[in-house]
Amino acid sequence: MSQKTPRNFFKPLAIGAPDPMRELPVRLERMIHFVPPHLDKVRAKVPQMADQADVVLANLEDAIPSDAKDAARAGAIEMAGMVDWQAKGTGFWSRVNPLNSPWFQDDVSELVLKAGHQLDVIMLPKVEGPWDIHFADQFVAQLEAKAGLKRPILFHAILETAQGMALVEDIALASPRMQGISLGPADLAADRKMKTTRVGGGHPFYRVIDDPNEDGSPRANAQQDPWHYTIARMVDACRMAGINAFYGPFGDISDLDACEQQFRNAFLLGCAGTWSLHPNQIAIAKKVFSPDPNEVKFARRILEAMPDGTGVAMLDGKMQDDATWKQAKVISDLADLVAAKDPDLAAAYSA
Ligand SMILES: CC(C)(COP(=O)(O)OP(=O)(O)OC[C@H]1O[C@@H](n2cnc3c(N)ncnc32)[C@H](O)[C@@H]1OP(=O)(O)O)[C@@H](O)C(=O)NCCC(=O)NCCSC(=O)C[C@H](O)C(=O)O
Ligand SMILES: [Mg+2]
């Protein structure tokens, strides 16, 4: 047998560690806002970021120079104490360095021992398979016991290698700590040997062209989405495991339109949120990952037309049945979650 028995799956992995969660907490996580914690100027903006973003993440991995790794770790621990995260209802996460790096052990042990009470989620980059999650799971359980934590810290994996992609279902199911998975399009592109130099988004050369026109006139062609398969597969793996899928980074900070479109495609395919790398991406994520008020109104009309979720109804010429009722419930439940945090959208949803 290569898997734990059902009874053992939910046992703590260290004596004194908190019980693993059987259900994920229901939280609004439309954007995970990345902060480089070694920069005093940006770290000073953390309380402001905590007011605006659903999740604030102290990034210790890529984008942090190797000679600033210690400073970033110290900055992350300082960030933990800068806001009363739980009272504010904003998530506090950290992305640690990869398991094979010289920094992983110090990142995780210092975060859990010094900031474990505040830390909701550890983001694990470059996860290759379930064995990476198992190793981190055991290590964190030992540290949780030592720190006397009562609430388990969750894990979020980044899909950024071909092997991780091939094993995404096993990664999603590896531990009750798994909260979600994000796409890491830049590392994944490199590992797959895609011929790009971008962080997410489309590419002007990745297109489909119409068949030739009989009159020889120019053929229409359009850019396609190179991430469609990856995102759809990640969403299936996550939802199968009862966890959430997230888009990831959009690196062209100046192209707000393309960022919005990439986020929207991910939202429609089932993602719960995305990353924001710059303050101007927070508003885009908020707009895209909050359901449109007209969609919410229509969804609620479906729920009202079929109070017990069965049967068939016609609304504006469109057939509704149990399956559209379930889709409507997804949108209505998300609207309730958003409304609890955002008074403007609450008013728009109830108008
Ligand atoms: C990308 C940045 C380096 C850009 O920073 P900057 O040049 O300072 O931009 P601006 O001048 O436009 O900034 C305007 C003000 O906003 C502040 N700022 C900038 N970024 C942030 C932030 N993330 N949080 C809070 N505040 C921020 C600036 O300080 C300016 O303030 P002021 O001067 O007072 O007006 C920068 O945005 C940045 O470092 N972002 C994070 C980058 C990052 O985390 N990258 C790694 C994640 S993506 C990745 O790892 C790839 C993935 O793994 C994969 O494989 O795909
Ligand atoms: Mg990466």
Image (tube, rainbow, N blue to C red):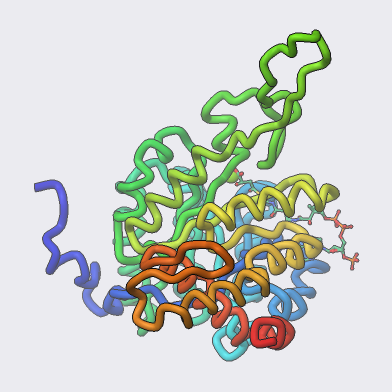
Looking at the image, residue 277 sits to the left or right of residue 225; the answer is right
Image quadrant for the C terminus?
bottom right
- The reply to whether residue 114 is in sight is no
> Does 175 sit above or below residue 97?
below
Q: Residue 45: name its quadrant.
A: bottom right
Kindly identify the residue that appears in the image at 14 percent across and 64 percent down.
6
**In front: 22, or 323?**
323
The image position of residue 108, as x and y in percent, is: 46, 62
> Does 7 sit above or below residue 339?
above
The image position of residue 26, as x and y in percent, is: 45, 77
Q: Residue furthest left?
A: 1
The image position of residue 234, as x and y in percent, is: 45, 48
Kindly identify the residue that appears in the image at 81 percent across and 62 percent down.
280
Q: Residue furthest right?
A: 254
Q: Quadrant of ligand 1?
A: bottom right
Kindly identify the residue that appears in the image at 52 percent across and 27 percent down.
192
The number of numbered badges drawn on the structure is 0
- The reply to whether residue 33 is in sight is yes
Q: Residue furthest bottom?
A: 87
Q: Residue 33: name its quadrant.
A: bottom right
The image position of residue 273, as x and y in percent, is: 58, 62
Looking at the image, residue 12 sits to the left or right of residue 39; the answer is left
**In front: 188, or 221?**
221
> Does 187 sit above or below residue 324?
above
